[in-house]
Image: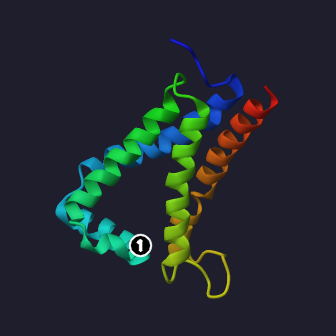
Amino acid sequence: MKIFARAHQLPPRLSAAAVILNSGLDLIEADEQRAVSTHGMAAGAYPFLRRMDPALFTRLLARSEVAVGMALLAPFVPSLLAGAALTGFAAGLIGLYLRTPGMHHEGSVRPTQQGIGVVKDVWLLGIGLGLVIEELRERRQH
């Protein structure tokens, strides 16, 4: 089995994986109330999700989080692929933050108290973009 992650990529991959995997595993056991709440927040930011069943949405979200977390944990998954998955996931979280009223101060990206829990995930976007940019730069040099 070939290892695709470089040694210096492992700490950010592992730290992001720990957070995302924990969230996904926790969400797998979501009850109906949590599914409705999770779906409602997502559908508020992304209206096309309103047509989706809350329980199905929550199951798919949980499985997606677990998949992204596992891809980051597994050093045989290329960093470009793991980074792209993380970037997409984190971009969705930042979109949720920017599109949800009350998460940030009006006319600003600065978070309100309600938004701190979501905006802090900007570090996930940074890790994902860092992995993608490094891998694309490496491919271009070779």
For the point 61% across and 53% down, the residue is 125
Residue receiving disc 1:
46
The residue sitting at the bottom extreme is 106
**What's the amino acid at mark 1?**
Tyr
Which secondary structure, mark 1? loop
For the point 69% across and 34% down, the residue is 135
For the residue pair 2 and 74, the one nearer the viewer reads as 2
50 on left or right of 137: left
Callout 1 crowding tier (Cα within 10 Å): few <14, some 14–19, many ≥20: some
Q: Work out which quarter of the rendered image holds the C terminus and state it.
A: top right
In the rendered image, residue 95, in percent from the top left (x then y), is placed at 53, 68
Query: What is the quadrant of residue 63 in the picture?
Result: top left
In the rendered image, residue 127, in percent from the top left (x then y), is placed at 64, 45
Query: What is the quadrant of residue 91 in the picture?
Result: bottom right
For the point 50% across and 75% down, the residue is 114
The residue sitting at the top extreme is 1
In the rendered image, residue 55, in percent from the top left (x then y), is placed at 20, 60
